[in-house]
Image (spheres, rainbow, N blue to C red):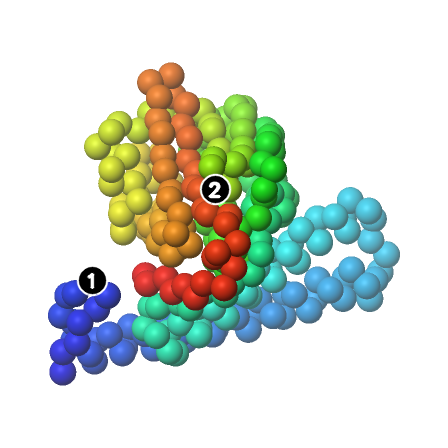
Amino acid sequence: MKRVNTEGQEIDANIETQRETFVASLSHDLKNPTIAQIRALELMLKGNFGKIQPKQKEIIEMVLDSCKYMNAMLCSFLTTYRTDRGSIKLSNEEVSIADLAVECIDEVIFLAKDKEVNISVNNSAEKETVFGDRVQLKRVVMNLLTNGIKYAYRNTKLNVKIYNEGDFTCFCFENNSPYINPEKQKQIFARYVSFANAHKEIGIGLGLYTSKKIVEAHDGTIFVQSFADERNIFGFKIPNSDIYSSKQRTVNF
C-alpha cells in the first residue's frame, strides 16, 4: 500500500508505520525518566534530601525548568505520531518573546560559561508578545541560542536583540563565528543540512529546519546574515497583530 507524504512523495505505508511506531516508542521511553527526574528535583527543592544552599537551589531550579520543557516537547511528539503523522496542531496563546528569551538564556547559561561566551540582551520592543504555541516557539529560541553558543569563538560575546519591525516582534542574536558564504546561507535551513562536521561537532541538521517550519507556521520569517568580519546574525520575526489571536495553525514536518 502506498500513500503520499506532505511533500507529495509516494511512500510505503508499512515502512512509514514502522517509523512512526519507533519514534513514538522512543519518545515514550524518554518521557518516563524525564518525569522521574522532575519528581526527584522537586523533592530536592522541598528539602526532602537535606538542606540546599541558595546557589545549589538556583541550579536545581534551572535544571527542573529544562526537564519540564523536555517533557512538554516529548508529549507534543507523542501526540503528533499518534494522530497526524508529522503534523502538529499548534496551540494559540499570548507569548512574550522577551520572557521566552530570558527563560532560554537561563537554561543555556552554563553552556555559554563553558565556552566563555558572554550573553547580553537588548530589548527595545514596545510590543513583546505574539500569538502562538509557546512550547514550539521555545524550541526555536533554544535551537538558535544553542547554535549561537556552539559555533561562537571562545571568549566572545553573543548579543541578543528583541525589537519591533512594523507589525512584527523580532528576536535575533549576533555572534562572532566562521563566515557563512551565500550558497551555504541558502541551504542552512534545509532538512538534514548540517555544518557541524567542519567544527568537529555532532549534528544531523534538523534544528534549523524545524525552527524554520515552526516560524513559518506562525506566519513569520527566519533569517541569517553573515559578514566578512566573521559576525553572524540569526533570528526570526513573527506578526504581533491581534488578528492572529484566534488563528488555528498547523506545522508539518
In the image, 51 versus 187, the foreground residue is 187
Q: Which residue is mark 2?
A: 167
The answer to whether 126 is drawn above or below residue 12 in the figure is: above
Residue that extends furthest to the top in the rendered view of this protein: 229
Element class at badge 2: loop
Name the outermost residue toward the bottom. 1
Residue appearing at x 42%, y 30% in the figure: 233
Residue kind at label 1, given as amino acid type? Glu
Q: Quadrant of residue 37?
A: bottom right
Q: Secondary structure at mark 1?
A: loop
Q: Is residue 155 left or right of residue 54?
A: left
Q: Closer to the camera, 166 or 190?
A: 166
Whether residue 13 is visible:
yes
> For the C terminus, which image quadrant?
bottom left
Number of numbered discs visible in the structure rendering: 2
Q: Residue 11: x, y in percent?
A: 16, 71
Residue at 52% x, 24% y is: 156
Q: Residues within 10 Å of mark 2 (few under 14, many from 20)?
A: few
According to the image, label 1 marks what residue? 7
Q: Is residue 103 above or below residue 18?
A: above
Q: Are marks 1 and 2 in contact (CB under 8 Å)?
A: no
Which amino acid type is marked by label 2? Asp
Gap between marks 1 and 2 measured at Cα: 31 Å
- Residue occupying the far front of the picture: 243
Please tell me how crowded label 1 is: few (under 14), some (14-19), or many (20+) other residues with Cα within 10 Å.
few
Disc sitting over residue 48 in the figure: none
Residue for point 54% across, 29% down: 159
